[in-house]
Image (cartoon, rainbow, N blue to C red):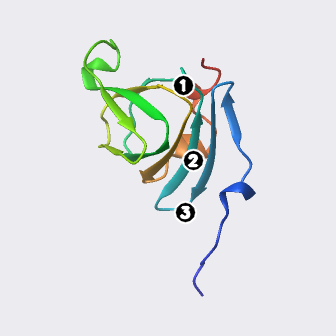
Amino acid sequence: MTDVRKIAWEDIEIEEMSPAIGRRLIYTPSQMLAHVYLRKGALVPAHEHHNEQFTYIISGGLRFWIGEHADNPGDTYVDVRAGEVLVIPGMVRHRAEALEDTIDVDIFNPPRQDWIDKDDSYLRGGK
């Protein structure tokens, strides 16, 4: 029998990562879908992971520093706004800042095990 499920986002409790970042997760063994809620000014510190990532902005906007610019953010960045998607291959270092209150959908393949295990200290307790 197939494991077909219908899930409403509002039925999933928001996990508060920090005062400025929250998320909801849906995942299977092969993929992960996340709603991420960022308040204006929220910072996602520089990091990388082996997972491929799509970040689709539902509302608001994020500024990304990619590669060598992730650790030394300056004038080289990519702004991603509502209706746009940023594709980040695995092992590409990146950092983000919310330009305004933002809701994004992140898709990961494979799922982020550190998010499932809540072993993602780089996101917890930030601005």
Circle 1 sits on which residue?
122
Mark 2 vs mark 1, CA separation in Å: 18 Å
Give the structural element (helix, strand or loop) at label 1.
helix
Circle 3 sits on which residue?
28
Q: Earlier in the sequence, mark 2 or mark 1?
A: 2
Measuring 43% from the left and 54% from the top, which residue is drawn there? 110
Q: Are marks 2 and 1 in contact (CB under 8 Å)?
A: no
Q: Dot 2, how many residues are within 10 Å of its Cα: few (below 14), some (14-19), or many (20+)?
A: many
Q: Earlier in the sequence, mark 1 or mark 3?
A: 3
Q: Dot 1, how many residues are within 10 Å of its Cα: few (below 14), some (14-19), or many (20+)?
A: few
Instruction: Give the position of the C terminus as an image quadrant.
Output: top right
The amino acid at mark 1 is: Tyr
Tag in front: 2 or 1: 2
Give the structural element (helix, strand or loop) at label 2.
strand
| Front position in the image: 41 or 93 | 41
Circle 2 sits on which residue?
35
Measuring 71% from the left and 44% from the top, which residue is drawn there? 14
The quadrant in which residue 4 appears is: bottom right
* Residue 76 position within the rendered picture, expressed as x and y whole percent measured from the top left: 25, 19
Task: State left or right for residue 52 relative to residue 115.
Answer: left
* Residue 29 position within the rendered picture, expressed as x and y whole percent measured from the top left: 52, 62
The quadrant in which residue 9 appears is: bottom right
